[in-house]
Amino acid sequence: MCSQMIACVLIPGFPLRAALEARPSLALRPAALAPIEGTEPLIGPITAAAEAAGVRPGMRMGEALATCPSLVLVEQDPAHAEQAWEEVLRRLEDAGFAVEPAEPGCVYFETSGIERLYGGLERALRRALAAVGSAWDARVGAAARRFAALAAASVARPGQVLVVSDERAGEFLAPLPLGLVPLEPSRQQELRELGVRRLGELAGLPGAAVAERLGPDGRRAWSLARGGGKRRPRGRRPPAEIAEALEFPEAIDNELTLRRALGALVETLLGRPERAGRFPRKLAFTARLVGGGSWRRTVTLRDPTAEAPRLRAALGPKLQELPGPVVELGLELVELTESTGRQLELVPPAGTDLVDRLHDGLRQVRAATGTGSVCTVVEVAPWSRIPEARALLVPRDE
Amino acid sequence: MVRTARLAGRVNAPRPALVVARFGGEPTQVNRQAIAVVREEWRVVDRWWTEEPVSRRYFDVVLESGQNAVVFHDDEHGRWFTQKA
């Protein structure tokens, strides 16, 4: 049973838990994750106190507040959630698990390689729980198929390990609620009206009839209710660890200033020695908003490049998606490709020698005086009538 | 995650100054140096729509030592500063 098992570590409501790290007192009060501005006003994950008050995840905001007037809406903090999730994944990887994250709060890994290391499946899964940490109330499910592992983790209690053998997977899944399969709420309602409320009831229907009535999504849900596919998890490539951030003395919302800051960040990141000549393929753009929230966008480049103008051109348009004034702008090199070599010029263009000497001089000054001693003057609002608002001094450590 | 946060500094940030002024607000001394002539005077009123409005009265002066200086009175906080305008 234990040779080809897939484990699923689940942290329900992870984005809410991450957002509550800054306000731990709310964890015991009725609270829900607020919807992102501009999206449908449906609340996200909720706390146990909110659930006890009759609130349900996915409820309309107005309905939720009418049900529980003391409900606190917690602003999303995607940048912090992603960072906290990355820390969880790293702890699992440090413990030897080759993880394949599905979404923040849900990760799969194969147990066959690690069982021997920890002396059995149960011990390995306990070790995974310990690696995640008790603060997250994680639970682990293991089964021969991915969906069965997820279902096992979904019904397990916090800190519990639930192993389902392949022979008993059908029996285990049958009484579980239909809500476990990823299906549109309207489709779920349609099935309920047809009297199908449990996974076993869905699995017992003829596949062709389900596909005809509910389309490809219904067919997939039917397949999952019967245990789902046996695709093995593939360990991810850990992201790079190079990040830079620029804090502003005051909230900034004009695009020119932000573009200048982006330029400075790109230059500084490309100059970091940890990059070791590798080319960025994927970058993450983060911002801390003036109200306390955060913002994050990732950009994957078609051709990896270390040319600052091309990186600026790729990242610049994302600035228009910023929802409000920012107090900190950050840039991370998420994925780097190996150096592929570069064709050098036979005769260097005129002026190269002078630029090289200047860079050497700056390097020596930096070595003598420390990080942050060499700065670039970046014009941010040259038209301003307030002299100190016209330019910023941005540290340069290339 | 190796993350470095850097604080962008200001260019031409105002510096507090010790200024002696006449009743009408015109300075006569800057940092214990007497003023020979006031070359120019102007007002900057900005950001009045924010919680940090700016209301300044600038003076471009020549000190008795021959040195040029720009000082302003911050009307919001009632203090004097020097600045490279």
Image (cartoon, coloured by chain):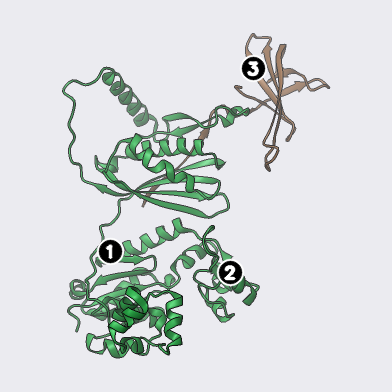
Chain colours: A green, B brown
- Residue A103 in the image: above or below residue A328: below
Determine which residue is flagged by label 1.
A93
Determine which residue is flagged by label 3.
B69
Type of amino acid at the residue the image marks with label 3: Ala
How many other residues sit within 10 Å of disc 2, few (<14), some (14-19) or many (≥20)? many
Residue B5 in the image, given as x and y percentages of width and height: 44, 44
Q: Which chain letter matches label 1? A: A
Secondary structure category for the residue under label 2: helix
The Cα atoms of the two marked residues, 3 and 2, are separated by 59 Å
Residue A72 in the image, given as x and y percentages of width and height: 60, 68
| Residue at (49, 58) in percent of width and height | A77
- Residue A386 in the image: above or below residue A148: above
Determine which residue is flagged by label 2.
A61
**Figure quadrant of the N terminus of chain A:** bottom left
Q: Is residue A137 left or right of residue B37?
A: left
| Residue at (79, 22) in percent of width and height | B25
Residue A244 in the image, given as x and y percentages of width and height: 40, 44
Type of amino acid at the residue the image marks with label 1: Glu
